Image (cartoon, coloured by chain):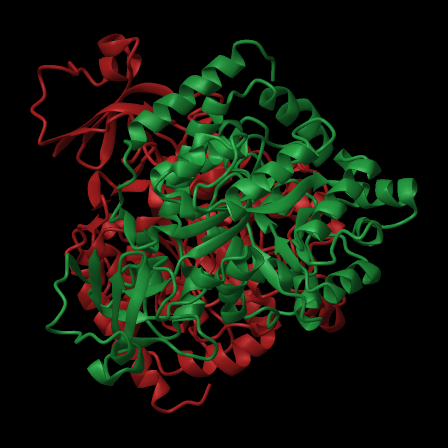
Chain colours: A green, B red
Amino acid sequence: MNIRLYNALILTMEENRPVFRGEILIRDEKILAVIEERSGCEDTGAREAQISCKDDVIWDVQIDCKGNLLMPGFKNAHTHSGMTFLRSMADDLPLQEWLNDRVFPLEAKLTPEDIYHLSGLAILEYLTSGVTSIFDMYLDNDATAQACMDMGMRCVLASGLNDFTSSIEKMEMDYVKWNLAKDGKVDSTINQITEHPRRSLITYRLAFHAEYTCSKELLSQVAALARRYQAPVYTHMAETIREVENCKHKYGMTPAVFLESLGMFEYGGGGYHCVHMSEEDMEVFSRHGMYVITNPGSNTKLASGIAPIAEYVRRKIPVAIGTDGPASNNCLDMFREMFLVTGLSKLKEQDASSMDASKVLEMATVNGAKAMGLGTSDVLAVGKKADIIMIDLHQPNMQPIHNIPKNLVYSGSKSNVCMTMIGGKILYQNGEFYVGESPERIYAECNQIVKRMLNNITL
Amino acid sequence: MNIRLYNALILTMEENRPVFRGEILIRDEKILAVIEERSGCEDTGAREAQISCKDDVIWDVQIDCKGNLLMPGFKNAHTHSGMTFLRSMADDLPLQEWLNDRVFPLEAKLTPEDIYHLSGLAILEYLTSGVTSIFDMYLDNDATAQACMDMGMRCVLASGLNDFTSSIEKMEMDYVKWNLAKDGKVDSTINQITEHPRRSLITYRLAFHAEYTCSKELLSQVAALARRYQAPVYTHMAETIREVENCKHKYGMTPAVFLESLGMFEYGGGGYHCVHMSEEDMEVFSRHGMYVITNPGSNTKLASGIAPIAEYVRRKIPVAIGTDGPASNNCLDMFREMFLVTGLSKLKEQDASSMDASKVLEMATVNGAKAMGLGTSDVLAVGKKADIIMIDLHQPNMQPIHNIPKNLVYSGSKSNVCMTMIGGKILYQNGEFYVGESPERIYAECNQIVKRMLNNITL
């Protein structure tokens, strides 16, 4: 399949490369060429691909971008897609109550099929917001993966391992299944899911829910696994003051320091939230090249606090951005998150110049890709995955066109996303979905699930 | 013109009235009936209007709402529409520098025609976000009014009077022109603008820029005018700590207390921003029934601080919401503002239950209307102005449908606005504008203005 996207403005997100006018050529799941208009066919990328941008290739699809912007899709570096059933059902409560009184009792009723449909709803929403990859931690990774493969979403799975859910054995099996058994030559313990034609959309990273839901023994087992596979590890970290205080009380150390002491981060990894980090915690992150994955919408709505993002940037700790799950945010919109990253940083630092727009865009795209191990989906360049979005600049919130990165971060909206392409496939265009399933059917399934849940519970 | 909007969910925003299924009938600029499906034609509203909802009336337009939500349009209770030229041109600076080094020098170059086009751009953006009324303070009220009348936006004008711009005489003349001379019988000093066929969209309120840009003498003259016309007065108030400290230093009082001492608020009024209010300031507001008009996007981006909205609500000081101008926010999106009102309140109070969704919706609609003197545009009821928006519930961020007010505030987006109607006229529907001018022409004019400005200035 050859696709040509022409008459576009292009923001490749390569370092220091400004927006230019040009076109992008795509073959199958990859970018064949990124052509700057002034240089035309003489562009290196086009030459290397040995194609003439005008004549030789037969284009299956040619899209006139009408001067709109092409850029890498957003990487939602922390979410729980299956939690869409909790949208507007578990609001206005502090984190621990919210988890214990609302989230856990309702989650206990979920079947894998429920999670499949609920993740499908989240995937639709990601597409409307230009999200082309998600880093998803939820109860049944296989159900999430199945929805992503069926609909075409790129997904990095993270185990939600804790003392009550999943097991170290399951996590190891999943790690092998998704990362090492790409060719299907796997033993019988690995189920058929691995034979899906879109299997390559899925990868897997070692992760556990949080220090406070795992025994020390279990955490040590995770650390051992990380060393065996030389793999990074991810977890919820320093989300609330209470979590940090409890950890200090229990182990005499803050979460990051405690987990490091178990040998958890010898191959790096990352922390979700990281709102309340000590000096020592930040040193742990610096030492191991770890990522902060910030979730400002969720931290705001749950009153968890404002993460010190400017301080992380000063220390060169890389920051990526996630929406968190739809129960705590409640929407899955990277534009909201981007504005909050910069806005809350300005408030926290009491400095309106804190956290400029291009830095935030980098977090939402390049850093997200790196944090998730998706180095081939980070920027728009020859040979990279065709994970591309088109931003409609012909809407009033994008005018006048003076500084496109600032327009995106400060006044951009999901309403500007007019195309979302993952691995060379257009999944969303001009408000329509191309995901092999009708949105209305997915909505009906999800409303049915909510109805069933509410049958036996008082909120 | 008779319009029937049927097969809808309806949120009238009348007190304690939940969402119901039904239809809304519109004649010319007003609501003829709001009909609840279960009661059909027996509904009081319909009966009073003496129409049969099925047969007697010839409908010029009938719209199947397909189960989507009809609700009152949002009231943007503080903005400076003409500042669209500064979008992405004056970011990342503290308020005073931002005003003195960027805003004022560039504004000095604006012509009334520029303001007309720049306001037109803002009006397009309001329509995409479901805004049906604006409370606009800018350099040339007539240019703003002309754009609003030509395009169909309801607008309450506020003078930006200060020591350098406008005059007390001009303000009085404008007050008379827009509020008292409705029938066109006015003296020759009042220009032709008052004869526009959509003149009734415009009203005028006494206002001045801020305590810190007006001499005491000028402020006393404003207060005298307020007493003469028994009129409320509005101004920027307690936006930054520096403003408050300077006022205390100059007059030995905080802004609200100082202005009250001049007799400014004998007929009420309101303060824009109100971030840093003392106990006494709040008492001034309570005493005079004044409105706090909060602008969380702007206060966040300029690092001005978080307003104590929960405290205002506890004291029963009514709160309305505005976007502020596009230079400081940078977008004109009431959904962003609504999330920030609740989210920042939760952060400030360190309480996730602070400021629930229905309270915020009330601020963005009913309270806004009241703050602006638009009592006939507050709710959906018989005889009220047909200022109505339709929210697309068939998008993934609105699913599942469990609690519509929470969906609107916590996960809603301007992308959900599929129709904006002002005074019975549909101005925006399914991404298309019906404002008598092409968006592309407005964009071209605005880009031209920006280009001209940048010719002679270094940013």
Q: Residue A169, position in %: x, y?
A: 67, 34
**Residue B414 visible in the snapshot:** no
**Residue B275 visible in the snapshot:** yes
Q: Residue A307, position in %: x, y?
A: 68, 56
Compare residues A430 and B217 and report the one nearer the observer: A430
Compare residues A127 and B199 and report the one nearer the observer: A127
Q: Return the residue found at the far bottom.
A: B456
Q: Is residue A179 above or below residue A280?
A: above
User: Which quadrant does the N terminus of chain B fall into?
Assistant: top left
Compare residues A70 and B109 and report the one nearer the observer: A70
Residue drawn at x 81%, y 41% as measured from the top left: A242
Compare residues B231 and A304 and report the one nearer the observer: A304
Q: Residue B314, position in %: x, y?
A: 68, 36
Residue drawn at x 50%, y 24% as measured from the top left: A112
Q: Residue A14, position in %: x, y?
A: 44, 74
Kindly indicate the quadrant of the structure image that contains residue A387.
bottom left
Kindly indicate the quadrant of the structure image that contains residue B456.
bottom left
Left or right of B314: which side holds A327? left
Residue drawn at x 48%, y 28% as measured from the top left: A115
Residue drawn at x 33%, y 30% as measured from the top left: B69
Q: Is residue B76 above or below residue B411?
A: below
Left or right of A9: which side holds A274? right
Give the total number of marks visible in the rendering: 0
Q: Is residue A268 above or below residue B415?
A: below
